[in-house]
Image (tube, grey):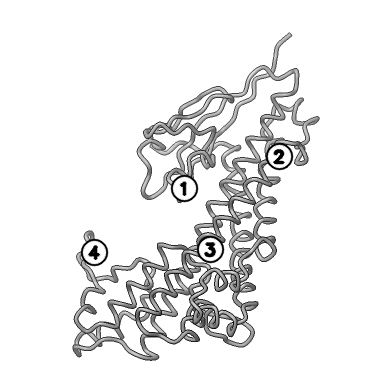
Amino acid sequence: MARRPTAQSRRVQEALRKLEPGIRKAFMAAIQKAAGAVDERALAAAIEAGDIQRAIEALRINQAILFPLDDAIRAGYIAGGSLVASDLPKGLAGRFGFDGRHIRAEAWMKQHGAEFIEGIVQETADMARKVVTDGLERGVSHKTVARQITGRKVGNRRVGGFLGLNSDQTDSVIRARSILSDPDQIRDYFVKDKITGRMKPRFKLSDRRYDAKIKKAIKEGRALTGKELDTVMEAHRNKALGYRGKVIAKNEAHTALAAGRDEAYRQVMDDPEVETITKRWQHGLSKEPRPDHLRLDGTVIDFDEKFEMDDGTLMAHPHDPAGGAKHSIHCRCIVVHRVKMRRD
């Protein structure tokens, strides 16, 4: 039976709904700005010279480009900390103010921002290596490979490029193209859904608008080629980028808000009139729940204790970076805190 949401959990969910669009917008804007800033000739020249590092540097994914995204995540941290005042006992709530300049708060925001940006930069490097390697193996021109990375220019924007995709998404697009461009493999593009029994694309982020076009090619015993193939793959990359933006927004909003709330309660603990703070794990009822997250639902521990996952990982709260992506991506869990005041 689903647990009835508390006022505290409702405030957290409302804050998340407000934060996610801003983080997603900042991510998409950063990728679009980076794509627009690339010198395509320099990128193609680096690819032709086989200088992958120079090609990666030409993509302009750096701290300056990603600053608005980092700033949006910082705002989520501050929002999480500021949210706590509404959940405190009346007497304490009136005098508590979240200190976003506390040394711990500043340290978390600096470290998380640096690690997040480093992760994006590394994924960009992985993507570039895979796309360049694939292009060279297929005998594609250096200019074409460069354009596939940055996307096609439409007005002042770039669309349909690999830039912004992570390693798994890049692999998926490359594999999809390989299947669709081979008359002997194209039938493998569709697989039977285990639940409905209907045929569907094997790649989750395929653009379903082109299913009919692909089925027609299969019926005619041919592969997709030329502009037809490029159009389908561009749509696939666009959808993958949009999906990644949503995943980053959800995960970073949860992570920042949870960390901000955790720091705020640490500051609450400094009040001499506070006796204890407890935290209760509340499962987020995701579509594919993690067994250990579901098991922890309702578990109450002291504030300084940690929740133990089935793999032995210890986490201060859901979306604690200590749990890594394994315990964070798509997780909707939160903690509900309870403050107990001293009685003299």
Mark closer to the chain start, 1 or 3: 3
* Contact, mark 1 vs mark 3 (Cβ under 8 Å): no
Q: Amino acid at mark 4?
A: Asp
Q: Residues within 10 Å of mark 1 (few under 14, many from 20)?
A: few
Between residues 213 and 132, which one lies in front from this camera angle? Answer: 132
**Residue 116 position within the rendered picture, expressed as x and y whole percent measured from the top left:** 58, 53
Between marks 3 and 2 in the image, the one whose residue lies nearer the viewer: 2
Q: CA distance from mark 3 to mark 2?
A: 26 Å
Which structural element holds mark 4? loop
Residue at x 52% of width, y 23% of height: 301
> Residue tagged by mark 4?
193
Q: Position of residue 103 (x, y in %)?
A: 74, 36
Cα separation, mark 2 vs mark 4, equals 47 Å
Could you tell whether 297 is left or right of 16 in the image?
A: left
Question: Type of residue at label 1?
Answer: Ala
- Which residue is label 1 attached to? 325
Q: Alpha-carbon distance for marks 4 and 1?
A: 27 Å
- Please tell me whether mark 1 or mark 3 is closer to you in this view: 1
Residue that carries the numbered disc 2 in the rendered image: 105
Q: Earlier in the sequence, mark 4 or mark 3?
A: 4
* Quarter of the rendering occupied by the N terminus: top left
* Residue under pointer 3: 245
**Mark 2 vs 1, N-terminal side:** 2
Instruction: Please provide percent x and percent y for residue 131.
Output: 43, 73
